[in-house]
Amino acid sequence: MKKLLTLVLVFACVMAMAVPAFAAETVTQDNGTASITVNGTYVPGASAAERVSVDVSWGAMSFTYTGGSEGTWNPTTHAFDGATNGKWTASEGNTITVTNHSNTAVEAALSFAAADGSNVTGSFTETSGTANDGVLALATAVGTEVANAPSATATFNITGGEISENGTIGTITVTIKNK
Amino acid sequence: MKCKVVALCLCILLLLPAFSVRSIAAENSHDPLTVKEATTVSTSPLTVDVPFALSFADATGINLNIRVNPHLVDTAKLVSPAACLSNTLYTANQTDDKVKVAIASASPISNEGVLFSLRLTLKSTPTEEDELCKLLQIKINERIISQATDRILLTGVTNGALYERDVIVNFNEGTATLNGAPYVGGTAITEDGSYRLIVTDLSGKTREINFTVDKIPDISVTVSWTNMSFVYSEGDWDPSSHTYGTGTWSPVSDGGGTVAVTNACRLTVETAFQYVEGAGNEGISGSFLSDGETVTGFVLSKNESKSVVLTLSGVPSTEMNQETLGVVTVTISEKKEG
Amino acid sequence: MEKNFSNKPKWIIIAVLLLLLLVIVAVIIWAIFFRTPDIPLPPDYPPQETDGNQQPIPNDQGGKLESPTGGGAVNVTYESVVTVDLSDKTVTLSYANPSMSNQNVAIAIVIDDLTVARSALITPGNMIKSLTLEDKAAKKLSVGGYDAEIIIYCYHPETGEKAMVDTRGEVTVYVTE
């Protein structure tokens, strides 16, 4: 029974593999003709291979940490007056802009990792109208001019931690994903 | 309708023994019996008059023994007697497939030209190959002037002919073989080939007919094609210009876009391929590849097959779904010598 | 008394074996949960050598991307398919650093914490189509497909200082024999 079923299935597979002629016509007259209609289908962008191409530009990303202060000793109270906490200030150029030139929509996820041994933390604020979720959503560039390619910008700020000397405080990573 | 058959009656005086002709010539110096072209008398039923010309001099008794083909002839009677028969007694009696014409005169009579006509009522319209009747014997004044040894009458075939159709042969008596195998009259011969038909009559005499059946028409070329639907794929995306490169058209199925031509006739033919763009898709052109080379056509010998693959080029101007892009036309023509 | 003397060596052996077992378990636990992943650690100041496989980008458009003073700008263009040939230890890919970028870049192909291949510097106007398969990856990878990342590190073209911004993208690595 198994062998018979196998034979039937093999026969069915062989028949399925055959590529028969779609149609045929016999011409029986001198200067006779056969006409064949040709059809076409085209969906813009449907079959093109995705090509990712984005511009990533960033500012100087220079931040200054001013350490905290104990304040001024007050002999009267035997306490320090006007103590202050440390704070970070950004120089100009703490923005990241991603511009999409791909034939597909992409997302640029922004993240910050402090350098080894550092406790610095940071956050991003999107400034180009997209949801402030640390992800820049960029539409496809198909149908746009190069100068008007979809673009999004976020501002990076240090939110915590401290440093005791000049140096690299961490790395910002822009992770591009197809949408 | 004038009956087009010229050789309806093969009352064959050509088979007369030479001495008989000479004897007549010596006595009477007149022409032998001849049969004139038949004329149609009526079409319903189909009736023809077959003139018999017999020249003789000073005869008081004339007897003709004629065999008609029972496949075609229904009845036969004597009509249009010559003037010399006006004072004679003449009869024409049909018994089965034999017609006996007897002429008796009290005084000697002479004749040149048509002596009488035999009016035949036919069962069906005969063709050029059909034999209606045969002369068996002529007696003038009781002396046999001619006697045919061949009594076999045929319909449906002519010796040495080429037929591009089925052939059906009928004969009035005897048995037959076709290429050595028994053949029953009325059986269709359908296969292409060369045939030898030998009919043997009841007395053992034979008649041989050779013919050929070749039903392949002059031009018969099969044009077949696979799925002729194509889909356009864009070229590579160029981020620097925000445009796609020139794309390609591909058949939607494996092996699609193929046109095969098979020559099934005896002639060598020429095939020509042409692609004509459809309205609105004038920017999409087509060409044909055979073994990797662009071709516009080729020559096909008998039983030869070749194929081409249609390739399209050009950028579609708009989105489309199974829209007619164009038409492939394959033209077949006989290859002329020279 | 004879009984005490004959049991002592046995106990010592058992104790040593137990200790050994504990050490092995500890090592295993450390390897699984606490070992630092082997991710690429790019130097802050890489050697100023360009990748020997880099080649000019055909039809490269001119111009420079704008970036704020002190910052940088790169165009990141890559194909999402990367193939690895285990037999000749080559990695085939396509990454271009167009001349509009104002940074040198170095790239790495990474599967989880395994570096598949890395490049030296690719200067603006050049592209790379082939890299050498890392030895560790050659031993670990097998025929099939892997989800991976391409990491782009940027370096100042004059000072060589590594930029603060890295870029990562999704690629698929197909491994063949």
Image (cartoon, coloured by chain):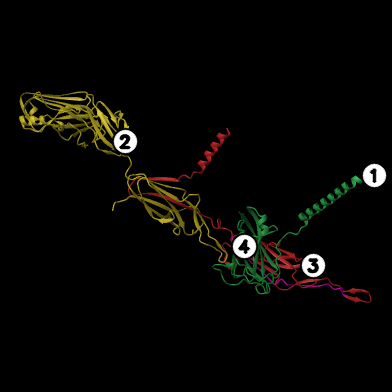
Quadrant the C terminus of chain A occupies: bottom right
Amino acid marked by disc 4 = Leu
Q: Is residue B128 above or below residue C104?
A: above
- Provide residue A158's location: percent of width, then percent of height: 76, 68
Say which residue label 4 marks.
C131
Q: Are marks 1 and 4 on the same chain?
A: yes
**Is B263 on the left-hand or right-hand side of A100?**
left
Q: Residues within 10 Å of mark 3 (few under 14, many from 20)?
A: some
Q: Is residue B297 above or below residue A67?
A: above
Which contiguous range is marked in magenta? A51-71
Chain with green colouring: C
Residue that numbered label 3 is attached to: A161
Chain at tag 4: C
The colour chain B appears in is: yellow
* Same chain? Circles 3 and 1: no
Residue C1, label in figure:
1
Amino acid on which the number 1 mark rests in the picture: Met
Q: Are marks 2 and 4 on the same chain?
A: no
Q: Which residue is mark 2?
A: B166
Which chain's colour is red?
A: A
- Disc 2 is attached to a residue of which chain? B
Mark 2 Cα shell of 10 Å, populated few (<14), some (14-19), many (≥20) = some
Amino acid type at mark 3: Gly
| Contact? badges 3 and 4 (CB < 8 Å) | no
